[in-house]
Image: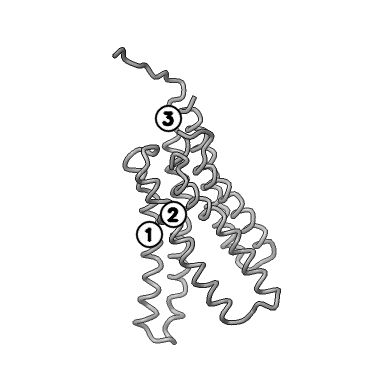
Amino acid sequence: MSMRDRQRTWTFAGAGLVLCGVAGMAQRSLGGTMGSDTIRIVIDLIFAASILLFAFGLSRDASVVGRKPLGVTAMTVVALWPLAEFAATRLFALGPLTDETVWRVHGYLALIVPAAAGLVAAVQIARSDEVPQPWRWAPMWVLGGYLVTWAIPQIIFVTERPESIQAFADLFQLLGALAALAGTLGLGIVALVLAARQRPESVEVYRSP
């Protein structure tokens, strides 16, 4: 039964991440047009549901972290952070909390919190026996990709003149899109492939001692 739960968990959660990736591309194509905020909220909700499903699973064996508290907590932060950040930015924009210090603190938190939670979650998944090798390292690969896509713009900002930065706008946008797709579409496809490899109809046979 646990094998069937694992297959269902990884299928539903993986499909959710794939949907997030596809919807994310649609959201970027809309840009600032009407309806883009609604699409983002829907994406964030599907993303949260998918990550939480990965974390808790339909059973303990179906959880990618075996429902270990540290892994579940880190993945919960990863799941809910986009929704929290969206709500915070809208609150700051509409309310009186537009002080530069508030935005600076928010910027630090937006960088540190998801990165730290993502790293802890990736380590817990890699250390778990629930996901087969080498795919248990996939979240770590995605984090490495995020690091590269973050580092390249920083290097350009330091090495190029301010008036030349605009020429790299398309590159920055492409890097951001690739990083986002790796964390949604990429991991979703991996989960679907792994789910398809599960064989819930098989019966485990125990040898006599």
Q: Residues within 10 Å of mark 3 (few under 14, many from 20)?
A: some
Q: Element under label 1? A: helix
Residue at (44% x, 61% y) in the render: 115
Mark 2 residue type: Ala
Mark before the other along the chain sequence, 2 or 1: 1
Residue 45 versus residue 114 in the image, above or below = above
Q: Is residue 78 above or below residue 65?
A: below
- Image quadrant occupied by the C terminus: top left
Q: Residue at x 40, y 56 (%)?
A: 119
Labelled disc at residue 182: 2
Q: Say if 40 sits above or below 151 in the image.
A: above
Q: Of the two numbered discs 1 and 3 on the same chain, state the one appearing first in sequence.
A: 1
Q: Relative to the observer, which residue lies in front, 167 or 71? A: 71
Q: Are marks 2 and 1 in contact (CB under 8 Å)?
A: yes
Residues 116 and 145: in front is 116
How much space separates mark 1 and mark 3, taking CA atoms?
Answer: 28 Å
- Give the number of the disc on residue 145: 1
Residue 66 location, quadrant? top left
Mark closer to the chain start, 3 or 2 = 2
For marks 3 and 2, give the one nearer the viewer.
Answer: 3
Left or right for 20, reference 194: right
The color scheme shown is one colour
For badge 3, the amino acid type reads Gln
What residue is rendered at 37% in x and 83% in y? 160
Task: Pick whichever, 187 or 87, lies toward us.
Answer: 87
Task: Say few, some or many: other residues with alpha carbon within 10 Å of mark 2 (under 14 / 14 to 19 / 20 or more).
Answer: many
Q: Secondary structure at mark 3?
A: loop
Q: Which mark is residue 198?
A: 3
Q: Measuring from the top left, give residue 19's x and y in whole percent.
A: 55, 48
Q: Position of residue 38 (x, y in %)?
A: 67, 58
